[in-house]
Each structure stands twice: as structure tokens, then as C-alpha cells.
Image (cartoon, rainbow, N blue to C red):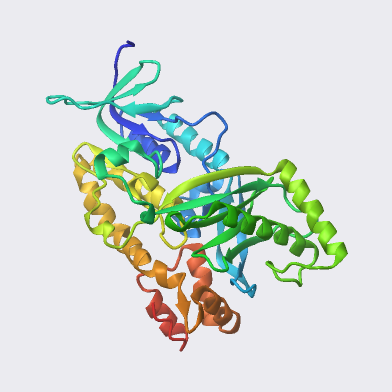
Amino acid sequence: MIANKKYDALIVGAGPAGAFAAERLAKGGAQVVLFDGRPPGKPKACGGGVTSKALIAWPFLLEAMGRTIDEVEMHSPSGARVRLKLNEPFAIYSRTALDAHLCARAQNAGASVCNKQVSLAPRINGDQLWTVCSRDGEKWQGRVVVAADGANSPIARRFAGALPNAEMEVAFGYRAPLPRVGTPLTVIAFLPGWAGYAWAFPRLDHISFGIATSQDAFDHPTLDRLLWQFMIGYYRQREKPGIKLWEVSEQAEDKARDAKTKQHLGECAERYAARIPGLAAETWSHRQVGGTDWALLGDAAGFADPVTGEGIYYALRSAEMFADAYLAGDVAAYDSHWRADFGRELRRASAMRMRFYGQFFGSPFTGRMIDFARLHPGIRRTLCELVAGDQGYVDLKRTLARRSLWPLAM
């Protein structure tokens, strides 16, 4: 057995939450080790969207290699669409580039980075330190242990309990080539007949296509067919901008082009999948994500928007708040601090989710939302701010009432 190595904090998971927490702690003088157990070069399955709210809060994110987006096209389940010009751009990153950038910042600040998969050892009565072990027998000890290793975190299950499928979402998709013609537009399309959406997020050298929906209603064969229809429609629209995204042409020329596109994607598209937390409103009241010598960050804590699945902002903010509590000498305060900061926002989003993907006067609410946004500048402006992360859910109804007479009862 290799001799123990002792640190102030052990951080398991080197995504945005873990790496940013490691950087902040190291800058504050703590001895930190950050564990990245992913195979080299394998990115997390993620659309990679970072809201303008996050870019404003942490401008150093712009130093990572990403594509800045100031225009988004949103599609209703029926195919109606609205083009949104954003006042504040957001960015789309390859998670390989973003995570590597944040990890390098942590190293430069003085954190140790270990590219090994580790597990938390049982704690024996009287132990003052936590211990994590690698498969080859190496051990590390620390006064505080931090789980930042995603929605499937075994450490999170140990401290906070497992989440049911009803409080999990699934995101899956493909990394595919940029279109050869036309502009690689950013697209968000709400699914016909499903609670969720598809996306096309252009990055610097490829597009991330994906679908996010609830795990308890997940039907992979059906959703995969829908995603392929979406991808082929996306490339088709670059060549023929006037047609609907979900529209299938029966013309021989169009069918031949679509078949060629599908064959090309089948040869080069790289598949990915991941689980995302989508906590119920009541769960936020009792789920504890921190104690006197432990903390859960980002997806491991359940910090993702239940409507959109977006989690990078909450990953970074939770890391920042934990580090502040640690450096102030009160790790346990982290659990109350996040509740005061963004807990109400996440709880409100959880309460809204079923209505957001439900019916509104006989049609999908998402379709009505886009129809009204096409006609009303106040609603269009609010939708832009939602996409950018500048408009929260807590005062969404009030904002819509102020900007329009549309009775958006949510």
C-alpha cells in the first residue's frame, strides 16, 4: 500500500465545479488535490452552453476556446420559429477545452491534479480525516472531501441519498461536422409530443446536437429517430432556409439529399450521453449538500435548471460559495448560503417545469410561447433574457405582465 498523502481538501471531479473550487481554495492558501478520473481526452456529455450571466460573473471564461453566440433560433413543436437577437451574447464550448482551461487555472493557483479515478473509503469512528483510494492502492487524506463528479456521484449518494428516476433527466446526442453551406445557426427546438427539447450548438470545429428529456419517460429508439430527423432537418435548412425543421419532403431530389446527409453523419458523428439532475420542488427543501467537513457541488448537488438542464452557471457559483465558506472557516455555512443565493430560483424552476412542457389553451405551452414571441416584442425580449440567463423564473410572471397583456399563468 502506497503511503498516505495529506491535504486540506480532496476534490473528486475536475469539471467546472471541481476545478473552480480547487483554484479558489489554492489561491486562499489551502493544500488541495483535484481528481480527474475521466479517460484522457474524453469530454463530459454536454451541450457546452455558458450563459451571459456566467460570462459576466466570471469573465476569464472567455479565455477558453469557444464560439460566442448572439443569435438563437427557437422552434415550436409544430415547426413555427422565432429568431432572437441577444443583447448579451452567450458562449458555446467544447467541454474538453473548457474543462482543460479551468483545470490549468487550478494547477497554476497551486492545486495538485491527479488523473486517477478514486473512491471514498469508509470512515472509522475516531477518524479525523477523509480518505480516498485509487484502484492501484494509492491513498490520499484530507480534512474536507468535496464531490463534484456529476449526477451519478457515488459520494453524493452516500451523503445525500440517491435520486429517483423522476428527478433525473437524460441528455444524449452526437458531435457532427459543421454544415458545408449556410450559417451554422444555434437552434433550440421543443419536441413534438415530449417534455424536452433538441439543440444544435455550433462549436469552433463541429456541432453538438442533442436531446434532453426526463429519464422516467425516456424511450431511446423513438427519441433517437427524432434526433436524427432533427439533425437532417438542420442541415437541410442550411440549404433551403424556407422549410420547417421537422418537415419531410417527398420530392426525389430532397429525399436523395437527406439520405446522403444521413449516410455521412452515420460515418462520422460521435455519440454521447449523460444524466442530468432535475429535482422536484419539494426536494430542495430537505436535500442537504454540505456539512462541517464535506460538500457537494454542481450536478453532484443537483444544481441544474429543471426546465433547461443548464448547470454550468450553478456549478461555478456553488464552487465559489463553498470556497468562500471554507476560507472563512465555516464549511457548514455553504448549505445555507446556496439556498439564500439561488435555491429559490431552482425551486421555482422545478415548480414550473410541468407547466412549461404542458398544455396552454389546448396547445403546447412552448408553441404558444413562440407564437406570441413572434408577434410581441415584449415577450420576445423576455425570451431572449431567459436564453441568456439574465431573466430568472422567480419574477418571470411579473416581467411578462409588465411587458405585455398576455396572461402567461405559470
For residue 269, side relative to residue 284 (left or right): right
The quarter of the picture where the N terminus appears is top left
Q: Is residue 193 above or below residue 155?
A: below
Of 388 and 218, which appears nearest the observer?
218
Spot occupied by residue 396 in the image (x, y as percentages of width and height): 40, 74
Point 65% across, 72% down: residue:
79
Spot occupied by residue 394 in the image (x, y as percentages of width and height): 35, 70
Q: Is residue 189 above or below residue 338?
A: below
Point 47% across, 60% down: residue:
308
Residue 268 location, quadrant: top right
Q: Is residue 32 visible?
A: no
For residue 81, side relative to residue 32 (left or right): right
Spot occupied by residue 25 in the image (x, y as percentages of width and height): 33, 36
- As drawn, the residue found furthest toward the bottom would be 405
Of 172 and 338, which appears nearest the observer?
172
Q: Is residue 116 above or below residue 369?
A: above
Q: Is residue 293 above or below residue 305?
A: above
Q: Is residue 303 visible?
A: yes
Point 28% across, 33% down: residue:
145
Residue 228 location, quadrant: bottom right
Of 32 and 182, which appears nearest the observer?
182
Of 259 and 234, which appears nearest the observer?
259
